Image (tube, grey):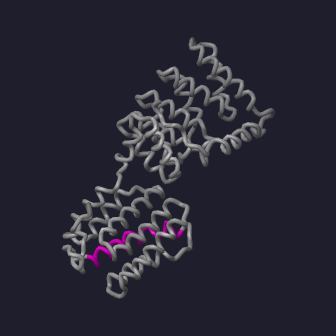
Amino acid sequence: MRDRRFVAVHRGGPLKPADHAALARWAADCAERVLPLFGRHSSDARPRQAIAIARAWADGELKTGVAMKAAVAAHAAAREAEDPAAVAAARAAGHAVATAHAADHSMGSLLYALKALEASGVPGEPELESRLVKLPAHLRPQVSAGVAARWKRPDDRFRDLDSDAWTVRERAVRRLFNQAVGAVTTLVTGAGHRSPRVRAACVELMDHLGDERCCEPLRAALRDASPLVRRHAVHAVGCQRCKVRPLPFDVVELLIERVESDSSPRVRRVAVHQLGLQAWDPRVASVLTRVIAESDDPGLVSRAEHALEEQRRRRPTRPGDDNVSGASDARHGAAGHRGNPPAASGR
């Protein structure tokens, strides 16, 4: 139900014209702060014009009909954009100017500004607090309550990842995957979630979407109390071919640590498999040889034998030779493996 505090006096509500104008100016400020995220991907002037028209309406220079047309134009620009942050930024402008028609659109301007920031990899929480304090004190309670009811904070968004229904978790994973780099901030937060299932899903997505921000969360996940989380962390660390660029840490060292110290046979097997996929490294050959000679786990030994064979295939034929076949495999894997999201964890 609509909050009557946003209904203008001329429509039978309590919102005075000066307060209505103040909300429009505030909404324009919210949208303007994220407008550069639209400008990075489009030269379309409609969102910027919408913000200017919102301010002109608030100053009494334009009629509401002009503002409504500008809102339609800004949302059309959003539909034509492809980058998630650009789409959200244009929608923020559309809601800012639509505040002239209905004051509760002002909340939409802030909500889409938060979405734009998060899609660009910037946390929304600081912006939320800084924008709310800019409101006149007597308008702040109704706007704060409305935004709080509509904005999904990270903990809310993790709820589906922790669902008992696999199909719900799968949809949540796909939504995050489709955000691409915009999801990384959420994944980093989720890697520290109280639920092992959420941690595992976020770590698993780092295999595809991970960048430098994921290095420390992945290091921590390799030592997580949950074997499921550790297993996905091992894969995310070892499978560099899925990422836009390799993560800047010693992958072999981290994988060897899991092979030698992990309490889970399944985690050790995944770590051995990932070692075999790395570029030739004498440390890998040494560890795999020792596993084959000393382990009493047939599954681990079998994987170590295959991994050692793969390492030998990747060994340069002469000192200083490039690992041509390994590089070719990585390129082939990147082309065929990065396009699909992982299945939801915890099945």
**Residue 231 point in image, percent of width and height:** 50, 30
Q: Is residue 20 left or right of residue 232?
A: left
Residue at image position (57%, 28%) is: 271
Q: Which residue is drawn at 47% across and 72% down?
A: 74
Quadrant location of residue 341? Answer: top right
- Closest to the observer, 122 or 70: 70
- Specify the segment rendered in magenta: 20-39
Quarter of the image for residue 252 reads top right
Q: Which residue is drawn at 42% across and 37% down?
A: 199
Q: Which of 56 and 11 is in front in this view?
A: 11
Is residue 69 shown above or below 308? below
Q: Is residue 29 magenta?
A: yes
Measured as percent of width and height from the top left, residue 21 is found at 29, 78
Left or right: where 77 falls relative to 21: right
* Residue at the far bottom in the pictured view: 61
Can residue 334 be found in the magenta stretch? no
Residue that extends furthest to the right in the rendered view of this protein: 318
Q: Quadrant of residue 106?
A: bottom left
Of all residues shown, which one is farthest toward the top? 296
**What x and y, as percent, mark residue 110?**
36, 65
Q: Residue at x 37, y 73 (%)?
A: 98
- Camera-nearest residue between 177 and 305: 177
Q: Is the magenta stretch mostly helix, strand or loop?
A: helix
Q: In which quarter of the image is the N terminus?
A: bottom left
Residue 51: image location, x then y, percent: 41, 76
- With 149 as the anchor, is 294 left or right in this view? right
